[in-house]
Image (spheres, rainbow, N blue to C red):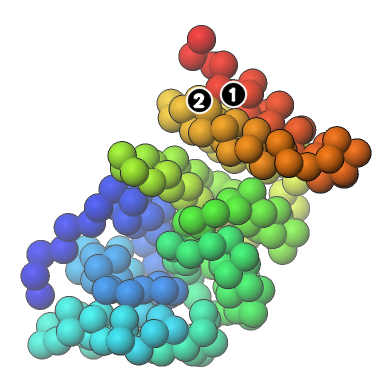
Amino acid sequence: MQQITLDARLSRVADMVPECGVCADIGADHGFLSAWLLSSGRVGRMYICDISAPSLDKARRLFDGDALAERARFEVGDGLERVSEPLDACVVAGMGGETMMGILERGLGVIRGATLVLQPNVDADRVRVWLYDHGFAVTDEELIYDGRWWYSIMQAKPDAGAARPDERELLVGPVLLRRRHELLPRFAQRQVRILKNAIAPIAPDNPRAAELSRRLDIWKEIAQWQK
């Protein structure tokens, strides 16, 4: 197999995967992350899953002729539907939060005891709410900007007794806030612009306007951290 070099996003995703016996990579596409996790010894076995057969074929070709293929299962399916055993860890990255929550909801039977590593493209706050509503707690977070795109990455572990974070922590990220992540002010400035544009056409008496205004105030405060 060719030497696997992960980009900044996937490198940080990989960092959050614990050493474990069996892990699933949902939406694996080219399979680079799975190959790295196996070749590094971080993970014993991988479920490499994608809803697209052509995408999964790219991963199969990456593993062709390599002994690592004996530790990999390639499954075409929707989310976790093809995973047939409880997982120690599960990666779901590079999709919208709504899609991600649906995958996790339908796959609860195999992820209840797993460390989750999630990278939602949008709606990270809603994913955090889902985690706490389903007995998980956010244990690590990262924020990455690659010059074009922002990426929010989080690790969550089973913890049914975890206290639910407040609105500010769920919106921004409890770990990012606690660490005062260096990129948060810049990300907050972006969120302020987005929310101002979203609020502008909404009637002031619309309940949605009040909700967005609360979010705007939170991001405005964080945007001022460096000033």
Q: Residues within 10 Å of mark 1 (few under 14, many from 20)?
A: some
Evaluate if marks 2 and 1 touch, with contact meaning CB atoms under 8 Å apart.
Answer: yes
* Rendering coords of residue 149 (x, y %): 38, 46
**Mark 2: amino acid:** Pro
Residue that lies at the very extreme toward the right in this rendered image? 205
Give above or below for 70 relative to 98.
below
The image shows residue 91 at horizontal and vertical percentages of 45, 66
- Direction from residue 149 to residue 194 in the image, left or right: right
Q: Nearer the viewer, residue 140 or 95?
A: 95
Frontmost residue, 74 versus 204: 204
Callout 2 secondary element: helix
Residue for point 51% across, 10% down:
227
**Residue that mark 1 sits on:** 222
The residue at which mark 2 appears reads as: 185
Q: Position of residue 141 (x, y in %)?
A: 49, 44
Q: Residue at x 42, y 44 (%)?
A: 150
